Image (spheres, grey):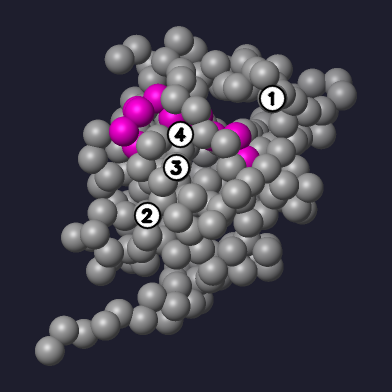
Amino acid sequence: MIAIMDYGLLRDRMVREQLVPRGISDKRVLRSFRGVERHEFVPPDLRGGAYEDHPLPLGEGQTISQPYMVALMTQCLALKGGERVLEIGTGSGYQTAILATLSKEVFSVERVKGLAKKAESTLARLGYDNIRIKVDDGTLGWRENAPYEAIIVTAGSPKIPETYIAQLETGGRLVIPVGTAFSQILTLVEKKPDGAVISELCGCVFVPLVGKEGWKE
């Protein structure tokens, strides 16, 4: 007999055991994590581990991040619901879906065409209609739709690209992993009228941010 997984129960457990004890306290973020179906964004053979406390491979050398890291980065943006968000690195589309439930509109850039198309299809199938995705060099942002109230970068960069600061609205927030190709520090940038305030949050490990203002391929 094949057991049927209760994904709703697994999502609730993920929130209670992985997110809340580690300081994820934004009620809107927690509600989003209880609602967005992470198992829909991972390869079918890995769905049994979709709500476990670790990243999962997507193919193309990319991963879907650990739920806690997705939640931490999202909470750092302090979204209220009316923001236009730029996401660099669509990946599976899971982080994109989380952002879509918490903001007005999400603009997502992915350099790997296969991942972008698959994420676009999954998000459309699940009914997310406030997301735009394009295939391009993510280190250049998405100038045509700037400025953004929030920018999130889901790959490790050797620096904070000036492009992102330029495309960020004054009063906006940018969260980005900065460091080497193998380990980074999760960094929060708050754009103030008189300059940027930079805070280092914690260590992390992301795939490299490849592009003109990131790592070379």
Q: Nearer the viewer, mark 4 or mark 2?
A: 2
Q: Residue at x 49, y 23 (%)?
A: 138
Q: Are marks 1 and 3 in contact (CB under 8 Å)?
A: no
The residue pinned by badge 3 equals 120
Q: Nearer the viewer, mark 3 or mark 4?
A: 3
Amino acid type for the residue under numbered disc 2: Phe
Q: CA distance from mark 2 to mark 1?
A: 26 Å
Amino acid type for the residue under numbered disc 3: Glu
Asked whether residue 210 is in view, the answer is: yes
Task: In the rendered structure, find residue 116 and report the number of the disc placed on it.
Answer: none
The residue pinned by badge 4 equals 89
Q: Are marks 2 and 1 in contact (CB under 8 Å)?
A: no
Amino acid type for the residue under numbered disc 1: Asn
Q: Earlier in the sequence, mark 1 or mark 4?
A: 4
The residue pinned by badge 1 equals 145
Magenta span includes 149: no
With respect to residue 212, does 18 lie above or below? below
Q: CA distance from mark 2 to mark 3?
A: 11 Å
Q: What range is drawn magenta here? A: 106-115
- Helix, strand or loop under label 4: loop
Q: CA distance from mark 3 to mark 4?
A: 13 Å
Q: CA distance from mark 4 to mark 2?
A: 14 Å
- Helix, strand or loop under label 3: helix
